Image (cartoon, grey):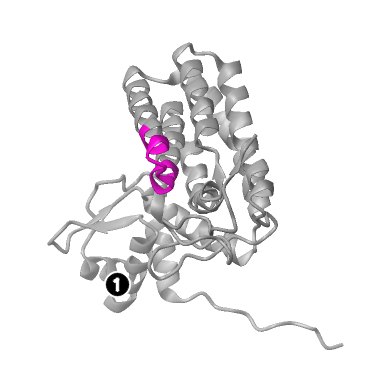
Amino acid sequence: MALNLGKIQAERTYQMVARSIEEEILSGRVPPGESLPSEEKLAVQLGVNRSTVREALRVLEQHGLVRREPGRKKLLASIPRHSEISKPLSAAMILHQVTFEELWQAMHALEPATAAVAATKVTPALLASLDTNLQATRKAIADADSNGLVALDIEFHNLIAEASQNRAIQLARQPLSEFFYPAFYAVMTRLNAGERLLVAHEHIVNALKNHDVRDATSWMDKHIADFQRGFELANLDITQPVARREENGDVRPFRDAPAAGAEPAANEPRVELA
């Protein structure tokens, strides 16, 4: 009887080399900051060509596990930066056609929990940074600066995550926020929601100052819930898949969204987020 078997995909040598070096780093036998042997020494040690080692190291550099000292060829084991971690996750969300609704649901689950943890761990330095953010937000509202307002909201939520002192939360938020906030900009350019946003931010900061977990959670929940209501009022389709990043670095979350810095058309007035 014939067997219905597919061809075996053999792992390439450079992939095996990369995995071997990765295991040494993740196991702690080569801690972050410690020098790695030269390409030549690694090739001899592993019994492979130097070009194979070079390709393996290139893969590890892309993943943030290896870096080179500026201006030198010396290789060091390293800790991946947030951007290096979020890039493949962002690509996966695009390819899986994750929708803005799914993204909002994830943020609605994560952000209130982040605020709750922050209420127990926030430091005086972070509270001072949050007060500075509130002052700048008031000015952006007075100046009708939508771009500035969105940037300040991003900063506000990043500060809350930092105040949580929870690295798992901070890493989990990174790829989500990269897609969430361009969509938030599309909403903000169509709605007069600045004052409502500011009220929520002020209540959240006050809750953090009082280490009030319940209030911090409640106000963050209301704040993120407002985003879905904003989609409805702005006549935007929350079921669309998240957008890919363009060559210039911009994210266009909706085909009909205004360009960055643009105001709503004359026949499309701003509406109040009641």
Q: Nearer the viewer, residue 204 or 192?
A: 192
Furthest-right residue in this view: 1
Furthest-top residue in this view: 210
Question: Measured from the top left, where is residue 30 in percent x and y?
Answer: 31, 48
Q: Which residue is depicted at the point 58% across and 62% down?
A: 254
Q: Is residue 20 above or below residue 196?
A: below
Furthest-bottom residue in this view: 2
Q: Nearer the viewer, residue 174 or 16?
A: 174
Q: Which residue is depicted at the point 65% across and 36% down?
A: 225
Q: On the picture, is 245 further left or further right than 32? A: right
Q: Nearer the viewer, residue 190 or 75?
A: 190
Q: Give the tally of numbered discs.
A: 1
Q: Nearer the viewer, residue 124 or 25?
A: 124
- Residue bounds of the magenta highlight: 139-150
Q: How would you classify the magenta stretch by its main secondary structure?
A: helix
Quick check: is 106 in the magenta stretch? no
Q: Is residue 127 above or below residue 144?
A: above
Q: On the picture, is 102 further left or further right than 25? A: right
Furthest-front residue in this view: 266
Question: Measured from the top left, where is residue 3 in percent x and y?
Answer: 80, 84
Question: Measured from the top left, where is residue 157 in percent x and y?
Answer: 46, 36
Q: Which structural element holds mark 1? A: helix
**In what quadrant of the picture does the C terminus appear?**
top right
**In what quadrant of the picture does the N terminus appear?**
bottom right
Quick check: is 147 in the magenta stretch? yes
Q: Is residue 13 above or below residue 179?
A: below
Q: Which residue is mark 1?
A: 54
Question: Measured from the top left, where is residue 216 in percent x and y?
Answer: 55, 21
Q: Which residue is depicted at the point 58% across and 67% down?
A: 255
Few, some or many residues within 10 Å of mark 1 (<14, 14–19, 20+)? some
**Circle 1: residue type:** Arg
